[in-house]
Amino acid sequence: MSEDTGLSRRRFLAVATSVTGAVGAGFAAVPFISSWQPSARARALGAPVEVDISKLEDGQLMKVTWRGKPISILRRSSGMLERMENSAVELSDPDSEVEQQPPYARNDMRSIKQDVLVIVSSCTHLGCVPTSRFEVAPADLGSDWVGGFFCPCHGSKFDLAGRVFAGVPAPTNLVVPPYRYLDDNTLVIGEDAEVAA
């Protein structure tokens, strides 16, 4: 065997060992680097939620969860909208001046479309879940009640737009999460609307 042949074999073995080591290091690095990424569960918790509202009838409420928060979607009937407009109840923040909603929901109805309300169902006092009370003037809520949300924990009241009544424990209106319409019957909760409809 000549000296040149031995040198060639050594070079081949050195190159082969280097390539094998580099491939092995790559295979070892992939799971390590992947472990830095958030889990699928963590990504899903912050992901937007698509909601089909095509079967939501007038006066009906549906609930979904986004980022671990209860979201209520109410299809307000024309009667509900009329009662809201004619209500004489004193509200703490009737013009939604406190930023509890995106700019496109800063209107009388606190929504993109007048008939569909999207709110976080968590009282702004201590986080209890308000119940939906859409009947008019029940004995326990008074003759000025035209429908809305009532927090059973400490008695806070909110109208059909999630605006807080004056003189109750809750300091602010119910929160309107970021949302947009994918089409007439599909909401995406967790993504802002580009323009208000």
Image (spheres, grey):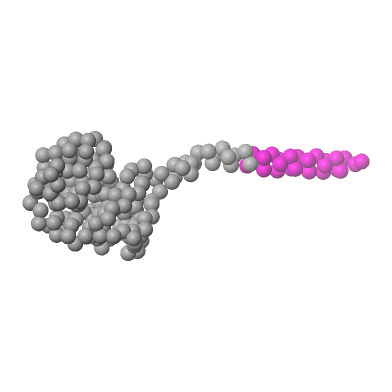
Q: Quadrant of residue 142?
A: top left
Q: Is residue 83 visible?
A: yes
The residues colored magenta run 1-26
Q: Is residue 56 magenta?
A: no
Instruction: List x then y, in percent, for residue 52.
Output: 36, 58
Taking the spot 31% from the left edge, 52% from the top edge, the residue there is 62
- In the foreground, 124 or 18: 124
Q: Main secondary structure of the magenta part?
A: helix
x, y (%) of residue 158?
18, 46
Image quadrant assignment for residue 117: bottom left
> Is residue 21 a member of the stretch shown in magenta?
yes
- 62 and 103: which one is in front? 62
Q: Nearer the viewer, residue 62 or 67?
A: 62
Query: Residue sitting at 33 percent across and 43 percent down?
Result: 69
The C terminus lies in quadrant: bottom left
Q: Is any atom of residue 100 visible in this view?
A: no
Q: Residue at x 14, y 42 (%)?
A: 140
Q: Quadrant of the N terminus?
A: top right
Judged left or right of residue 140, residue 2 is right
Residue 22 at x, y percent in the picture? 66, 41
Quadrant assignment, res 76: bottom left
Residue 121 placement (x, y as % from top left): 27, 45
Q: Residue furthest right?
A: 1
Q: Determine whether, in the image, residue 138 is placed left or right of residue 45.
A: left
Direction bottom: furthest residue: 184
